[in-house]
Image (spheres, rainbow, N blue to C red):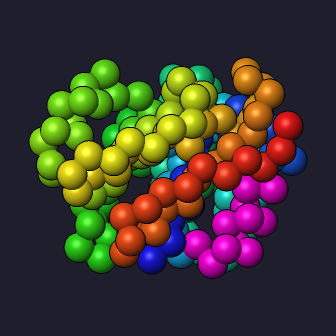
Amino acid sequence: MKIGLISDTHDHVPMIERAAELFDREGVQLVFHAGDYVAPFSLGPLLNLSCPFKGVFGNNDGDRLLLQKISEGRISGDCLVEEVRGHKILVGHHFETLDALISSKQFSLIVYGHSHVPGVRKEGGTIAVNPGECCGWLYGKSTVAIVDLDRQEAEIITLGP
């Protein structure tokens, strides 16, 4: 099963659209957003995905009530634990205890954002992925990730400068 990962979209709708097009083209079956949508108007491309998306809030999300309402409850709070095909997945914007979470061996996949720096860390049966910044505002590179849960592999994909 392929899962799309996105974070730190920060209202950059053209890049969010590009990410959604990639996820649809790659046959992603579920998308997790690790926060920092910022404004509710930026949710459009995610709501039009051909698969479901779920997400959490980040530290820059403004009107949380409207984000939750427009997303029809797909944005659930600051942390999300989801069971997908026997894999326990943890999604959050920022984990100060990331090392401990990975070492706990409780999760097959940990998804986070906040730093805007993409990265994949595999330790034992856990993959921790920061898809980087979809917006490209901070570092000038727009990235997302796709995880193959069955193979326990993750790939960072550059959408553009």
Q: Quadrant of the C terminus?
A: top right
Above or below — where is 34 with respect to 27? above
Q: Position of residue 81 (x, y in %)?
A: 29, 53
Q: Position of residue 107 (x, y in %)?
A: 23, 53
Residue depicted at x 65% and y 35%: 133
Q: Position of residue 40 (x, y in %)?
A: 69, 41
Above or below — where is 49 with respect to 57? below
Residue depicted at x 59% and y 23%: 60
Prevailing SS of the magenta stretch:
helix
So how many labels did they put on this image? 0
Q: Is residue 158 left or right of residue 32?
A: right
* Res 95 visible: yes
* Res 75 visible: no
Residue depicted at x 60% and y 49%: 156
Q: Nearer the viewer, residue 70 or 55?
A: 55
Q: Which contiguous range is marked in magenta?
A: 16-28
Above or below — where is 82 with respect to 135? below
Above or below — where is 117 with respect to 52? above
Q: Quadrant of residue 142?
A: top right
Residue depicted at x 45% and y 77%: 1
Residue 20 is a magenta residue: yes
Q: Position of residue 84 (x, y in %)?
A: 32, 70
Q: Is residue 121 left or right of residue 68?
A: left
Q: Quadrant of residue 65?
A: top right
Residue 25 is a magenta residue: yes
